Image: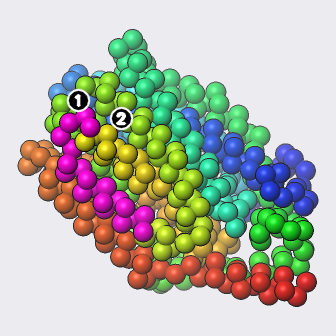
Amino acid sequence: MATEAVEIRPSGTATGWHYPGWWVVAAGFVIFFFSFGGPTYSMSLLYNEVIAEFGWTRAQATGIYAWKGITGAVVAILVIGPAVQRFGLKPVFLTVLTLQALGFFTLLNVSSIGTYFLAGFLIGLGQGAVLLCIKLLVARWFIRNVGFAGAMALVGSSAGGVVFPIAIAWLLPELGWRATYALIGVSILAISVPLVLFAKQNPTEEDLLPETVTAKGPPPAVGLVAAMRAADHRVGYAELVRKPMFWAIMIGIFIIAAVDQGLFQNMQLYFVQEVGLTRETAAWLLSLTAFIGLLAKFIAGKFFDVYSVKGIAAWYLMIAFMVLLAFTVSNLWTAIIFVCVLGLAHGGLVCEGPVLAKHVFGPSNMDKVLPIVTGCFALGSSAGPIVLASIFDRTGHYNFGFALFTGLALLAAFLLTWIVRPLYRDRLRAATQTATAGS
């Protein structure tokens, strides 16, 4: 991997909240706010606008999310990992942010389904990779708290989801949907790009020592570096794809992303056109979902750190329950109950990717595994909304789609429960206990 300039001095024995990795988490929070939370949570507000202007079907209106997701998946799986290993994380990060901003500027010129999908293509080139780049950046700095640290950065996405829907619902009548969404591109260039320029990308092994064992007590001995290396087994792509656990993770991630985003991206259409809520009320419910998701990320991150793979499988069961609850929505109060559960279940997702990649395969394989995990998540995210919308277009209701998605979420939980084990985490625990006992 290319070495990059170091912007701050090595951390030495800084521990607790003085550990410099937390500054990286803070930068990730802000980048997620503008570059992921805003685009993700506000995209569903666009669908009613383009249907009203162009007369498109629901599948066509939500198709921009499919183009965005498919593009992000291909880039994450085939491009980002090799590019990061060759050029370094920072140049790749800056490139994808610029492409994402360009996608939002393209919405200014939408006059047909082709230019509409082109905007989704460009947004997808950036957004899926932005998610991956932040995950890689934060995961490099954490071992013991990789789930919690990732969750804290991802809270920026939920915070963006709280603010952006309300702001966009307010701006739409004033500026129109084209100019309103172009402002997201402006915020990415003005805020996210400078933060990437100043964030330290690559911690040394000595930087990571305070994050290897419990934060209580004296700083850990340098001898733990050998224990960390012993637990970390580097494998090639050919060996990875022969492991059943690898495929169980990828299939499970794809399925759960399809279920989650399928429901999430169709909710504005469901609330406005089926339940009969106003656009403003639906936007307020979207912000409530994001606010609950903000809190859920803290819970999920710590939960995944403690319970690892089994904890993630349990969260997938909650997704299944969330889909079942969608059957009950018929008025404002049932909608509020539903979005509370939706916010909790949806908010905990995305945190699981770095935990699965690191707990199962180890740090030395993160640059290989995490891009594929993120790509599978993006593929599932792109497939779910258009599948659920297409089922509605064919049947005139969501009932069959909700039932199908419930079964798929249960399948994803089954795959993680019975096939996947946290191999690296177990080896690391054994190695560090031996090293600290002998020091």
Residue 244 at x, y percent in the picture:
44, 83
Q: Which span of residues is magenta-colored?
A: 314-333
Whether pointer 2 and pointer 1 mark residues with C-beta atoms closer than 8 Å, the reply is: yes
Q: Does dot 1 land on a helix, a strand or a loop?
A: loop
Q: Is residue 136 left or right of residue 328?
A: right
Which amino acid type is shown beneath numbered disc 1? Answer: Leu
Residue located at (20% from left, 62% from top): 404
Residue 315 at x, y percent in the picture:
43, 64
Residue located at (37% from left, 45% from top): 340
Looking at the image, which is closer to me, 296 or 408?
296
Say above or below: 347 vs 254.
above
Quadrant (top left/top right/bottom left/bottom right) for the N terminus: bottom right
Q: Which mark is residue 285?
A: 2
Instruction: Reply yes or no: does residue 356 show up in magenta.
Output: no
Q: Is residue 179 left or right of residue 97?
A: left
Which amino acid type is shown beneath numbered disc 2? Answer: Leu
Does residue 129 show up? no
Looking at the image, which is closer to me, 67 or 145?
145
Residue 304 at x, y percent in the picture:
55, 66
Earlier-in-chain disc, 2 versus 1: 1
Crowding near the residue tagged with mark 2, few <14, some 14–19, many ≥20 C-alpha atoms within 10 Å: many
Q: Which residue is mark 1?
A: 277
Q: Does dot 2 land on a helix, a strand or a loop?
A: helix
